[in-house]
Amino acid sequence: MNTALMIIFFLFGTIIGSFLNVVILRYRSGRTLQGRSMCFSCGKTLTWFELVPIGSFVTQKGKCAGCGTHISWQYPIIEAVTGFLFVALYIRFAYLLTQIPLLFAVLFGYYGFIFCLLLVMSVYDLKHKILPDGMTMLFASVALIGMFLFKGDALILHIPSGWDCVAGLLLPAPFSLLWLVSKGKWMGLGDAKLMIGIGFMLGLSAGTAAILLSFWIGAGVSILGILGLALFAKQKAVSLKTAIPFGPFLAFGTLLVFLFSVNIESITQFFAR
C-alpha cells in the first residue's frame, strides 16, 4: 500500500470527521449546519486554527482558548475514527485506484457516505439512546439504490437476486417481533429499522453475519462495561438490565463484514473446523 496515500486519506477523513461532529451536535437541536462553530460555554466564535482536526485539540490541551472550558473528547475521537475509516476504505478498494480510478472514486464516495452516516447514527445513539428515523430511512434508501447499482465491486445496473431484495425485510422481522412482544424492553425499534438498510446493503447472508457479529461483540463489550462500572465506578444500580445502545455494534458489525467479505457461510465454516 502507498503510505503517502494512506496519510492523505487519513487527513481527508479527519476533515470529514470534523464536519460529522457538527452534524451530531446540531441534529435536532434547532440549529442548521450553516453558521460558524463556537464555544458552547463562552460563545466565542472559533477561528480556523481552532478548527484544525485533532491538531487544535492537542495544541489547546483540550481547552477553549477563550474561557478555558474543557473540550469534549468526542471531537478528536470522531475525527480520528473517520480518518481510520477512510484509510480502511482506501485499502479495500486500492486495487482499483490505478486500474479504474473513476470506479474507485464512485465506490469510495458511496461507501464513505454510508459508513459516515452509520458513524453519526452510532454516536447519536450513544448520546441519546435513540436512532433517528430520518437517518435510518436515509441509510435504507441509499442502500436500496446501491443494491441495483453495485454488484460486488462492479458498477452495473442490474436486478438483484430475490434473496437480496427481501433481505431488508427479513433481517429486521424477528427483531421487530421482539420489540413488539417486549414493548421495547428487549430491543429498540430503531435497531430493527437500521437492519433494513443493512439487509439491502449486504444481502441476506452477509447481513445475517453482520447482525450475528454485532450481538457477539455487543455482548462482550456490554458485560465488560457493566463489570467495569460496577467495580471501579461502584455504581450498584448497573446491572444486566442496564440499557445499552445497540446501534454502534450493528454499525461495527456491518463494517467488519464489508471490509473482510464475511458471510454466514464463512462463519459456519470457521466453527466447523
Image (tube, rainbow, N blue to C red):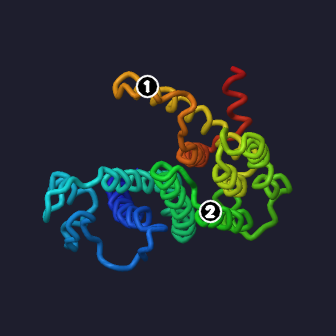
- The kind of residue tagged 2 is Asp
Q: Kindly indicate the quadrant of the structure image that contains residue 234.
A: top left
Q: Residue at x 38, y 54 (%)?
A: 78
Residue of label 1: 236
- Quarter of the C terminus within the rendering: top right
Q: Position of residue 191 (x, y in %)?
A: 64, 49
Report x, y in % for residue 225: 45, 30
Q: CA distance from mark 1 to mark 2?
A: 33 Å
Q: Position of residue 177 (x, y in %)?
A: 78, 44
Q: Residue at image x 41%, y 24%? A: 230
Up-down: is 273 above or below 7?
A: above
- Kindly identify the residue that appears in the image at 40 percent across and 28 percent down: 235
- According to the image, label 2 marks what residue? 133
Q: Is residue 90 left or right of residue 250?
A: left
Q: Which residue is found at the position 68% from the left and 51% from the top?
A: 189
Q: Give the answer, above or below, for where 8 lies relative to 208.
A: below
Displayed quadrant of residue 252: top right
- Tag 1: residue type? Lys
Q: Which of marks 2 and 1 precedes in the sequence? A: 2
Nearest the eye: 6 or 31: 31
Horizontally, is 176 left or right of 96 in the view? right
Pick whichever, 104 or 80, lies toward us: 80
Q: Nearer the viewer, mark 1 or mark 2?
A: 1
Give the x, y percent position of residue 238. 47, 29
